């Protein structure tokens, strides 16, 4: 029995040694192949100006217009609620001395309710607006990334950087600036009718 266990252990040690050898020999081959896939000869980089994209891309312009109109609508709704509250306060101040204790209490409760409703609505609308901004910005970003995947494949580019006034690129050769082409193609893609 002792000899059988010793033989099984020896077979297991040999099997583990063979697996280690196979794993590490294939791992080196895979890493060397993937490292050699990108060479300096086929490694191309370009950039686009994010500020130009923000000001010229129709998708972003439309998104900003929509969010601004929505913000204006929310502002009007909140202003209307605030005006109703102010009018109620003025009404209370004018009638205050002639009101009974019960009527004063009713007015004060109504004013408190209106104030709380305004604050709750304002907070809710601002959160909704922020969530809408994040959602729409993410959608635009994904559209740009999807576009750039195809664009890079067609142009043989390895990377495309977005450059803005706060970037960490200390030198940019304008020969690799693809801003105008990217904006033009994005706008053309944005204008295509949905099928």
Image: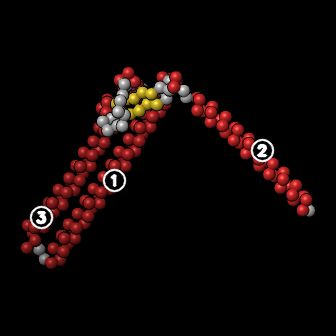
Say if 64 sits above or below 16 in the image. above
Judged from the image, the secondary structure of the residue bearing numbered disc 1 is helix
- The residues bearing labels 3 and 1 have C-alpha atoms spaced at a distance of 32 Å
Determine whether label 1 and label 2 are within 8 Å by CB.
no
Q: Nearer the viewer, mark 3 or mark 1?
A: 1
Mark 1 or 2: in front is: 2
Q: Residue at x 74, y 41 (%)?
A: 22
Residue 18, labelled with which disc?
Answer: 2
Q: Split into 4 quadrants, where in the image is the N terminus?
A: bottom right
Q: In this view, does 74 lie above or below 179?
A: below
Q: Which residue carries the number 3 mark?
A: 91
Q: How far apart are marks 2 and 3 (CA)?
A: 91 Å
56 and 107: which is toward the camera: 56
Residue at 54% across, 26% down? 39
Mark 2 secondary-structure assignment:
helix
- Mark 1 sits on what residue? 127
Residue for point 86% across, 55% down = 8
Quarter holding residue 28:
top right
- Along the line of sight, which residue is nearer the eye, 106 or 72? 72
Helix, strand or loop for disc 3: helix
């Amino acid at each position: 029995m002792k000899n059988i266990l010793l033989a099984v252990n020896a077979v297991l040690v040999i099997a583990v040694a063979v697996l280690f050898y196979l794993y590490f020999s294939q791992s080196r081959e895979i890493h060397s192949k993937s490292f050699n896939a990108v060479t300096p000869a086929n490694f191309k980089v370009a950039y686009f100006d994010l500020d130009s994209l923000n000001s010229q891309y129709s998708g972003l312009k439309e998104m900003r217009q929509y969010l601004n109109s929505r913000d204006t609508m929310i502002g009007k709704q909140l202003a209307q609620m605030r005006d109703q509250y102010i009018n109620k306060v003025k009404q209370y101040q004018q009638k205050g001395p002639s009101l009974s204790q019960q009527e004063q209490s009713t007015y004060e409760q109504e004013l408190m309710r209106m104030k709380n409703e305004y604050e709750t609505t304002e907070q809710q609308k601002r959160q909704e607006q922020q969530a809408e901004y994040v959602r729409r910005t993410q959608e635009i970003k994904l559209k740009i990334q999807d576009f750039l995947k195809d664009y890079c494949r067609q142009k043989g580019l390895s990377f495309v950087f977005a450059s803005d006034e706060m970037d960490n690129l200390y030198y940019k050769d304008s020969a690799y600036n693809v801003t105008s082409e990217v904006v033009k193609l994005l706008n053309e893609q944005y204008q295509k009718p949905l099928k």
